[in-house]
Image (tube, helix red, strand yellow):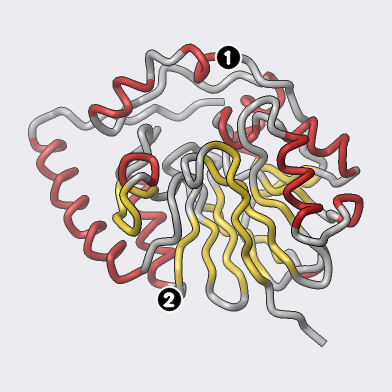
Amino acid sequence: MSTATRVVPIPVLGRHNINAYLLLGRRPVVIDAGTPGSGRKIHDAIAAHGVDPADLSLIVLTHGHIDHFGSAAELSRLTGAPVAGHVADLGPFRTGRVREPYLPTGPMGRLMARNAKLHARAEPVEPEVLLRGETDLSEFGIEARVMPTPGHTAGSVSVLTGRGDLVAGDLIAGSFMGLVPGRPANPPFHDDPVGNLASLRRMLDLGPARLHVGHGGPLEPGRVRQWAAREERRLARRRAAGRLLARGAED
């Protein structure tokens, strides 16, 4: 008998500035591991929701940025759970260093790119579960699929539950890192803005009920579709003006 998967946010920084997520089904799964030094905080938040952290079956990393995989090695040690990550982001995971330079999506990204914490080295982590294509997570105890959503980074993934919750990492964000509730926006950086928008549209075509993001509270798909249409026009203007940056193929 299947058990519907429930999505529980775990704030890592502020109320919604940086989020991890606890997915509850037959067994618990965590999505993302926050910044370096957050492992114990995430571990204790899991326990606070009535879940034994030792029961955790998997830690899924949505991509190779330090605010999403920074405590993966620590959290894996604390819980005994294996880590899953996409093969295209193995470089950052294995070295603990983000591919640089960051490519800002706007003024906030240009400001944040000067923050020394974003250029720090996290503890490296070796994913035991290597993700490539779409991956069913039922063997780990939840009714959900990992969906490749490249663009933010080459190895970005999202997780779509059977109930239609899309845990989207940095596919999209809340405005001003979640400070404006319900308003979609770009996160501060994308390696490939056009590719990311294409991934977002593919996920919207699957009809998610809501989107849970790395920065901000849940987003309604209708508002995200409207934002995506505006973003497509903005990117077209930037392309026409020769101002559209994207990271070339790496590794």
Residue position marked by numbered label 1 in the rendering: 120
Residue occupying image coordinates x 67% and y 21%:
122
Residue 37: give its label. Answer: none
The C terminus appears in which quarter of the rendering?
Answer: top right
Name which residue type carries label 2.
Gly
Rendered location of residue 48, percent (x, y): 77, 54
Residue displayed at 71% across by 52% down: 30
3D distance between C-alphas at marks 2 and 1: 37 Å
Q: Is residue 207 above or below residue 175?
A: below
In front of the other: 89 or 5? 5
- Please determine whether, in this image, residue 17 is positioned above or below residue 211: above
Label 2 or label 1, whichever lies nearer to me, is 1
Determine the image quadrant of residue 200. Answer: bottom left
Mark number displayed over residue 207? 2
Looking at the rendering, which quadrant does residue 167 occupy? bottom right
Q: Is residue 160 left or right of residue 22?
A: left
User: Is the residue 156 above or below the residue 77 in the image?
Assistant: below
Q: Is residue 202 left or right of residue 74?
A: left
The amino acid on which the numbered mark 1 sits, given as a three-letter code, is Ala
In this rendered view, identify the residue nearer to me: 223 or 52: 52
Q: Position of residue 216 (x, y in %)?
A: 43, 49
Crowding near pointer 2: few (<14 within 10 Å), some, many (20+)?
Answer: few
Quadrant where the N terminus lies?
Answer: bottom right
Counting from the top left corner in percent of width and height, residue 16 is at: 48, 46
Q: Secondary structure at mark 2?
A: loop
Quadrant of residue 147 within the rendered picture: bottom right
What is the count of numbered marks? Answer: 2
Q: Residues within 10 Å of mark 1 (few under 14, many from 20)?
A: some
Say above or below: 71 vs 150.
Answer: above
